[in-house]
Amino acid sequence: MCRGQVNRLKLNTLNDALLTPMTAESALLLALFIPLASTLFIAANYDRPNWREGATLLASLLLLGTVASLLPEVMAGGRPTVDLFELVPGLTLRLTAEPLGMVFAGVAALLWPLNSLYSIGYMRGNQERHQTRFYVCFAIAITSAIGIAFAGNLLTLFIFYEALTLSTYPLVTHKGTPESMQAGRLYLGILLGTSIGFLLLAIIWTGWMAGTLEFTPGGILAGKVEGPAVAILLALFMFGIGKAALMPFHRWLPAAMVAPTPVSALLHAVAVVKAGVFAVMKVVVYVFGIDFLHETGASQWLMWVAALTILLASCVAMTKDNLKARLAYSTISQLGYVVLGAALATSMGVIGGSMQIAMHAMGKITLFFCAGAIYTATHKTEISQMDGLGRVMPFTYAAFLIGSLSIIGLPPMGGSWSKWYLLAGTADAGQWAMMAVLLISSLLNVAYLLPIAARGFFTPTTQAAGIREAPLACVVPLCLTAFGCVLLFFYADALYTLLAPIAR
Amino acid sequence: MSAPLSFLFRPGRAAWLFATATCWLTLLMAILLLRQVLAEGPISYPMGSWPVPWGIEYRVDILNAYMLVLVAAISAVVMSFAQLIVERRIRLPEHKQPWFYTAYLLCMTGLLGITITGDAFNVFVFLEISSLSSYVLISIGRDRRALTAAYQYLIMGTIGATFILISIGLMYVMTGTLNMADLAARLPAVAHTRTIHAAFAFLTVGVGLKLALFPLHLWLPNAYAYAPSVVTAFLAATATKVAIYVLLRFFFTIFGPQFSFETMPLDLILLPLALIGVFSASLVAIFQDNIKRMLAYSSVAQIGYMILGISFVSVTGLTASISHLFNHALMKGTLFMALGCVSFRIGSTQLERMAGLGQSMPWTMGAFVIGGLSLIGVPLTAGFISKWYLILGALEKGWWPVAVLILLTSLMAVIYIWRVVEVAYFKPAPEGQIVREAPLALLIPTWTLALANLYFGLETSFNAGVARQAAEMLLGVAP
């Protein structure tokens, strides 16, 4: 598409949206434009909290509608594409909607309204400062996440990936205390360090060898690289995508726990780590191509690193008494599943891993919402202090139980499907050791997640007097996401149909 | 190109208006010239109508047309910025202000002259014009240490100039000509002699001093740190760039790539120097508390990148160097001008004094951040384009460690830029400090350059396209 067309298209975007049935291309642009434009409204209404948060909610719902409107076209096999700029000949900023990106964009767009609603309850309930900055940065982070989801090539992906890192920094250091600044430095240091040091190098190397950076079904590297270079390149990509928290580059995630809980939810469920594993998936499927990886066996080592991450992080999670820290290590472990799915290089593995992106998002956001609700209601952060709270906060704890079950992968929760496909993937690849890892990890999940809910419901306590449920704006979203976990179990086949073409 | 007549105007403001008009007019002419060169090929203009090998020839091809645009553009923008700084910050008395503009215009004339001339001796003459006037410009700073800095620069600069003169003299003795094209034609016949080898060595060291090639960079941090910010912005964005141009011109056009890189192992010398320069200067920059000094060290590192590109001796490498000439001028211009705005308001460029400026001077710091991002080489800014070509050049050669080192030093740039951002945006301002945004007269030129950083990051037909053509011309590859 030539540049003139694009400009005209940009001008007409709003008209199209309002007057005519939207074309998929304009919806794609609109999906980026809505959260970006909302920052202006949010910033302009800094002294009117109701308007400001109203703008956030409205934008998030509009975004959800826009992303949803793209779904039928992508399901039908369409790949709407928009070129924004051409930097150097061959380097174009390009947006493309494809199944994998739809899943991630869908997750981000679906969880943003819920998270915004929850943020209102949490931020007001805890009387946090700098709320305008919070909402503005949040909207920019969502813009970046959408940009990553719809990135048509590695360069576009990289740009939005960095934008996401930078826009979430003020969120992580929101409290402004010395320890949060320290955590912020670690966060920025690891994420920027790995992305510039490894990822950018890998991208340039790829561009040089393959002659293109476009995401192409079947990969662009087959026949262009051989020998150990494939494994080295894969390593640069995998460790370069620090957001996927593959060990040993996982430290930023627990450190970022100092942030307010809605931010943790953003990091763990909506955008950041999901952007990481999404990028991993995207690289494996569209840059290397699963057939190519399967033939060369270059991803063997990655499987073991992922397995190690899964098991080690689960073990560390068991030792943590701080609820958010335990959830953080659980996230690291769960992200390992996605990477494992990619490393298996079988279609079932890829589908399972991609599904895990959505399933884990829904489950983990529920858990974080609950952790935040408990904090808002009781100001408790340690699991050992939370005995008996389930009786006074029944909704929160019920949601926590559902979320836990989904993470563990028990039916009838959505999480069971992704685990199922991953197991099928290990069987397809003949990797029995990996199957054992998955099963052991599920047991470990049971061991560190269920006791929390069990203590809440069954351990008697004296301190529960005077404690009530958190504000409604906190409780409603967490009930909705818990319900979502159940819903995903019944509608997983839609997800499967959407994802099936990429693994072919 | 331009007449340094501004001292005729007595009141400072009139002189400034005149100088600014001159600069913009020059820019316009330079752009027209570039268009003509792109359309019709090199232009030659014999001075005083003497036939070419004997008279002084002005010869404009793609490379120096590109450099002319660069120098003229930066001069014009920085000059627009100068007036308030000269009046309020440097506090020159009214009757002395015209002298500042005179020196500035002289310096610019010198730089343009070096670029445009087709005569080796003429290069030296213009080099001296620009150097002498830049000593004046640096010493004009209110800080007493500016005098020592200027003196240091004077000594080093003079040694450099002498070396260049010796080199040109040796070449003249051997070939009997000073015209560049003529030199290039006659040198191969005597290329094996020790005299020419010596000439080559003198030239490399001499120009190396001028462009602050590591380890000949010692004069630069002081000179940049204590000169007024206008002068720093101007010199950082133009003077060292022109020196690199001289290097390119002599290495590739006069000696020819064959002699420079095969007979003399120049690439083997430049490569390690460039790498060490980039790495050590970036490292030092991280530990500076004076931001101006920090940026000065970063300049040394950036010069290293350009030399690195040259040492690849490939079209991609040279494209990287030549486009980085332009891109670095844009980013450093932006950064130093933003810093000029800061010192205009708070009277200091110390890091700890910048706390809370993100809130009180949002536009200034915004420009600083854009310049910083460009310096780091974030995509969508001009800096990314040259980094991209540079790394591509390294990979083409199969020099892995070099590519890794380039990225590593980009990371170091992240660190030193981030220190400023963190202090300015995330530290509260000290109690009772009231700082207002810089005046529009300063902000508009600063933002012009900041936006240029973004514009040339997206629309690269000038800084990458023309650079590539120039690189192909230098290496004699058919475009």
Image (cartoon, grey):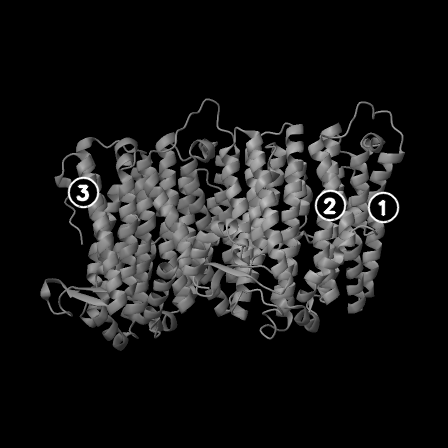
Q: Which numbered marker is on residue A364?
A: 2
Direction from residue A432 to residue A504 in the image, left or right: left
Q: Are marks 3 and 1 in contact (CB under 8 Å)?
A: no
Q: CA distance from mark 1 to mark 2?
A: 16 Å
Residue B253 seen by the camera: yes
**Residue at screen point 67% across, 32% down:** A121
Q: Specify the amino acid type for callout 1.
A: Ala
Read off the residue under disc 1: A447
Going by the image, does B431 lie left or right of A245? Answer: left
Disc 3 to disc 1, how far (Cα)? Answer: 80 Å
* Amino acid type for the residue under numbered disc 2: Lys
For discs 3 and 2, the disc positioned in front in the rendered view: 2
Mark 3 highlights which residue?
B18
Please name the amino acid that badge 3 sits on.
Answer: Phe
Q: CA distance from mark 3 to mark 2?
A: 66 Å
Which element type, helix, strand or loop, lies under badge 1? helix
Judge whether residue A302 can be spotted in this image: no
The chain identifier of the residue carrying mark 2 reads A
